[in-house]
Image (spheres, coloured by chain):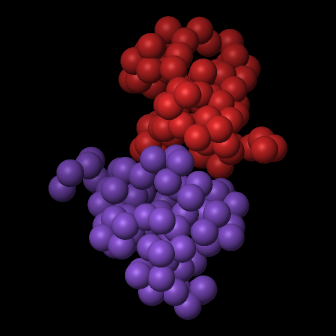
Chain colours: A purple, B red
Amino acid sequence: MKYKEPDTLYLQKIGTTIKTLREEHGWSQEQFSFKSGLHRTYIGSIERGERNISVLNLKKIANTLEVPITKLFDFEI
Amino acid sequence: MKYKEPDTLYLQKIGTTIKTLREEHGWSQEQFSFKSGLHRTYIGSIERGERNISVLNLKKIANTLEVPITKLFDFEI
């Protein structure tokens, strides 16, 4: 485990939220990669909660998903 | 300029928001550094909008400031 447990859980919650929003658009990771400009494997690792994402990449993801960035934190811990 | 203009502005808005919240607590950067575990110079560069902050550091900052992480994005662009 690369991060402390609570941090890993936090990153996984963000990843799951992003995945859900992506699927609501009906996009594959490939399509999301094309639309966001982020590499597909990076998107996969984000959705699995393996990345300590930077705020500018979070903003890029939120913009692509057409949601406010705060929506990516819309989960219970 | 290290980042594209809109990104720089975005980071500056987050930095200003963090600075305002810190000052509302009446904390110096030094005190905030001690409470958060983040280095004082790093805090200074965040508040100046020079850092593409990671989400785990944003979470650490929000927890220290005793606000939800979404509060750090409470600004108009």
Q: The C terminus of chain B is located in which quarter?
A: top right
In this view of the protein, which residue sits in the foreground, A3 or A31? A31
* Image x and y of residue B71, in percent: 69, 43
Say whether residue A34 is left or right of residue A1.
right
Residue furthest toward the left? A1
Say whether residue B45 is left or right of residue A42.
right
Q: Residue at x 44, y 73 (%)?
A: A33
Q: The N terminus of chain B is located in which quarter?
A: top right
Q: Residue at x 27, y 47 (%)?
A: A4
* Image x and y of residue A10, in percent: 42, 57
Residue A59 sits in quarter: bottom right
Residue A8 sits in quarter: bottom left
Residue A75 sits in quarter: bottom right
Q: Residue at x 65, y 30 (%)?
A: B12
* Image x and y of residue B6, in percent: 67, 43
Q: Is residue A61 visible?
A: yes
**Is A30 located above or below residue B62 in the figure?**
below
Count of numbered circles in the view: 0
